[in-house]
Structures are given as C-alpha cells and as structure tokens.
Image (cartoon, coloured by chain):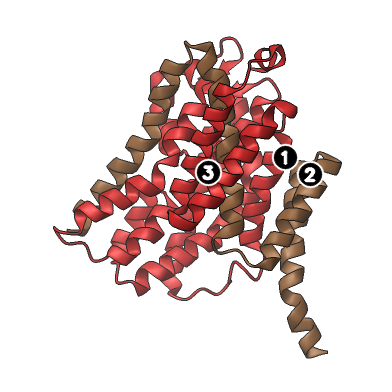
Chain colours: A brown, B red
Amino acid sequence: MEGLALLVMAVTTYATRLGGFAVARYAHRVPRMLRILQHVSMGALVGIVVSSLTTTADWAVRIAVCAAAVIAIVTRRTLLAMLAGAVVAAVGRSLPLIVGAA
Amino acid sequence: MAAVGMQTGITWHGIRRGLQGIAPVAAAVVPFGMAFGAAAAAAGVSPGAAASMSVFVFAGAAQFTVLGLWPPTVDTLTAILVATLAVNARFVIYGATLAPFVSGSPPLARYATAFFLSDENWALATQSDADGRRDLGVLLGAGVLLWAAWVLGTALGLMTGVLPIEPRMLGLDALMATFFVAILVSSWRGADDLWPWLGAAVAALVSARALPSGYAIAVAAVTAGAIGALLPERAVADARS
C-alpha cells in the first residue's frame, strides 16, 4: 500500500509540473496571454513571500525578509540581499543565548 | 544538446548558470531534507518509502503534508491524492509562466526538465529572463542540484534519525524566505506592477489563514493575473515580454 501511495503521489506531482508546460505551449501563441502570465508569475512570487512571512515565521524571519528587501532595493544585488538577510536571522536568534550567557 | 532559436531553448551554458545560481539555496536544502527524513521515520514511514518519496516525488511541502496520513490505507489514498494535488497546484502556474522558455526546447528536454520544477529553481529561472536569455537549462541545472540536495538530506535524516543541525539555528529557513524576496525585488518592472502586486499580497494574506500555503500562492498568482488583465495595456509592457 505504501508503494501505491508513492505511485499516486509521483504521478500526480509530475502531472502538475508537466501540465504547466502544456499550458505554456498553448499560451505562447497568444501574446496577450504572455503578458498576463508575466503578472501571474509576479503574483506567485508575492504569494511565496507572503506565505513565508505568515505561516511558521517568527520575528527573526520577518526582520530578515525586511532587511533583505531593503538591501535588494538599495544594492540591486540579489545574492548579497539573500545572504545578508539570513545572517540577520541567525544573529537575531542567537542573541538571546549570548545575552543569557553574559 | 543546444536547441537555441530566438534566444529560447536549452543549453549547457544555461545548465551551468542554474547550478551556480542555486548553489547556496541547494546547500540550505540539505538540512530541510534531513528534517523530512527524521520526521518520516518518526511518523512510521518505512525508510525505503521515505527515500523513494524524495527521489520520485521531490516535493517537500506535499511530502510533509502526507506524513499525517501515513500509513496509507485504501480509504486514505484519495486523501493523499487530493492533498498532493492541492499543495502542488502552484506547479501548474509555475510551468505556465515559463512559456517563453518551453517553446524553444525539444520535447525530451521539456519532459525531463519538468520533473525537477520546484519553487526555488522556478524563481531563479524567472530572474534570468530579465537578462534577455530564456534558457530552460537554468531550470534543469538548478533543479537537478536541488533534487540531489533533497535526496541526500533525506538519506542523512533517515540514517541518523535525529536532526543534528536545526535549520532555524543557522537561519536557513530565513535564507529561503530572503532568497524569494530578493528575487521578487529584482523582478519589479515599474508602476504597472503596483496593483497586481498589492492584489496578490492581499489575496495571499486572506487565503493564508484559510487554506494551505500551496493554495495561497496559486490564489495570489491568479489574482495578479486577473488585475493585470484588467489594466490597460501599455507599450512598455510589450517591449519587455
């Protein structure tokens, strides 16, 4: 039964991945669809960011995301913004330990 | 291997760019894979099934979600299918938005690359679009590395049974979030994006309370698309698409 469940999951998941590509093949012939899909992709990114802030995020993640956004806007360096934000979160989380040990 | 036409297609150069671009994120994926391996063992999933899940499904959100439905019975198979479909629905949207990348690639490349579609390499691939290159290889190279990291992490988590590195302590969950926000910022194209973005943010906030995260992303994406479709078309938008 585990094997069957795995098969169901694998087939379903691949279908969603390939399904999008199938839509893409059709949409590519319609220029207006391409413009709309640009907005759709931006919306998905916004959705990912909002989800990362609301579900299991603590204050450290929220501050890290804000810091990363500011750094990204100011420096226009994606990698720098990403790593700096993660460092902020790690430092922020270990501060209580450092302060407590002092 | 190269099938390039009108700057679309799949090339080795794109694959290398994908590997390089995703490397830090892939490193962060390993501890998350370990978390899944450990959680699966704790949930009573057999090691072979847990490993196979990471190898053949390669969808962290769905994999964690179905742990609550293990061990599967004839009755719960439908629930597993529905849960997987709901959480992974956003993949349909991701694939659709990659229309310019997909059109110039041969069928085998499309079928193979599709397997590795995930949140992180999709976001990376959309970013490469701004440079004028639309190389499906970015998606493939990054996807293979993410998959390898996920499988490796799962194997390690299954072997140790305990999570020696808590991802949160290293800020790795934050790294995932900052990765996406950094790409989001770089994808801003001007005032035309304001209302779609705001609409998407509101839609995501509202649905995040009521629905699983996979749904929230899909709802936000569709909302942005609807708002974008309703807005008057500008000549600038044509030049960039």
The CA span between labels 3 and 1 is: 16 Å
Disc 1 residue crowd, few under 14, some 14–19, many 20+, Cα 10 Å: many
Residue drawn at the location 47% of the way across and 38% of the way down: B117
| Kind of residue indicated by mark 2 | Ala
**Residue A47 picture location, percent across and down:** 56, 45
Q: Choose mark 3 or mark 1, whichever is in front.
A: 1
Residue A62 visible (yes or no): yes
Q: Which residue is mark 2?
A: A72
**Residue B148 picture location, percent across and down:** 49, 49
| Kind of residue indicated by mark 1 | Val
Quick one: label 3 or label 1, which is nearer the N terminus? 3
The CA span between labels 2 and 3 is: 20 Å
Judge whether B12 appears above or below A29 on screen. below
Task: Output the chain of dot 3.
Answer: B
Q: Secondary structure at mark 3?
A: helix
Q: Which residue is mark 3?
A: B119
| Kind of residue indicated by mark 3 | Asp
Judge whether B215 appears above or below A22 on screen. below
The CA span between labels 2 and 1 is: 6 Å
